[in-house]
Image: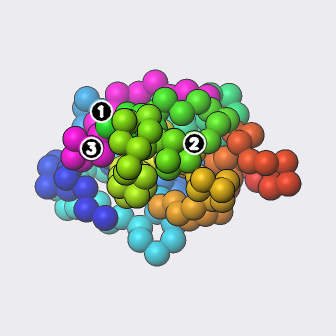
């Protein structure tokens, strides 16, 4: 995946988490990227990006609190980059309450595009700030766990952490 911010000088840090290493990238004003470093597509920071953990102290604090079950809503300056449609989807994702899931169809209806669940799914899949912009809270209309950039086991862990899986699939994953 290519992020619009790749051509700009930004800071980055790789954070260890219960779901694997997360690459955080941004500038002095906001977080632009959270990228899963495990799996088949780790992100290599562009040469002009500078490794520096300091800009991400608050993001790391909030992510750690989330993973330990002590935070249900993030309060961070975010700067995802995308089309107007993608930005609308990503803003709406942030309104899905902790511990709840919506289907792609529900999300499409929320943005007043009931005919566009596939486009919503594509935008969801391009979310550059997963976990914090909770794309993991979107599931299939039949309740199935569908695609996720970090992989379905990570999606399952995040939903289990939030208590959003049916009892049969709930487990102590953290």
The answer to whether the residues at label 2 and label 3 have Cβ atoms under 8 Å apart is: no
Q: Is residue 59 left or right of residue 166?
A: left
Q: Which mark is residue 30?
A: 1
- Position of 49 relative to 95 (above/below): below
Q: State the CA–CA distance, disc 3 to disc 1.
A: 21 Å
Give the residue at mark 3. Answer: 85
Q: Is residue 54 visible?
A: no
Q: Residue at x 31, y 64 (%)?
A: 1
Q: In the picture shown, does residue 32 fall above or below 118?
A: above
The disc placed on residue 102 is 2
Left or right: residue 128 compared with residue 130: left
Q: Horizontally, is 72 left or right of 34 in the view? A: right
> Which residue lies most toward the top here?
75
- Label 1 secondary element: loop
Q: Nearer the viewer, residue 152 or 46?
A: 152
Please rate how many residues cluster around mark 1, counting C-alpha atoms within 10 Å: few if below 14, some from 14 to 19, many from 20: some
Residue 13 place in picture, x, y as percent: 39, 49
Q: Main secondary structure of the magenta part?
A: loop
Q: Secondary structure at mark 2?
A: strand
The numbered mark, 2 or 1, whose residue comes first in the sequence reads 1
Give the distance between the C-alpha atoms of the residues marked 2 and 1, in whole angstroms.
27 Å
For the record, the magenta segment spans 72-87
């Amino acid at each position: 995946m290519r992020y619009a911010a790749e051509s700009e000088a930004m800071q980055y840090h790789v954070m260890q988490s219960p779901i694997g290493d997360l690459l955080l990238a941004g500038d002095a004003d906001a977080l632009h990227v959270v990228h899963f470093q495990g799996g088949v597509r780790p992100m290599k920071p562009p040469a002009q990006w500078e490794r520096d953990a300091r800009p991400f102290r608050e993001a790391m604090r909030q992510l750690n609190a989330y993973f330990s079950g002590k935070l249900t809503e993030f309060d961070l300056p975010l700067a995802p980059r995308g089309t107007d449609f993608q930005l609308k989807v990503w803003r709406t994702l942030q309104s899905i309450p902790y511990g709840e899931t919506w289907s792609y169809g529900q999300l499409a209806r929320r943005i007043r595009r009931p005919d566009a669940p596939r486009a919503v799914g594509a935008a969801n899949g391009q979310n550059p700030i997963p976990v914090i912009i909770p794309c993991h809270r979107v599931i299939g209309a039949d309740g199935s766990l569908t695609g996720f950039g970090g992989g379905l086991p990570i999606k399952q862990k995040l939903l289990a952490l939030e208590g959003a899986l049916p009892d049969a699939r709930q487990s102590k994953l953290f």
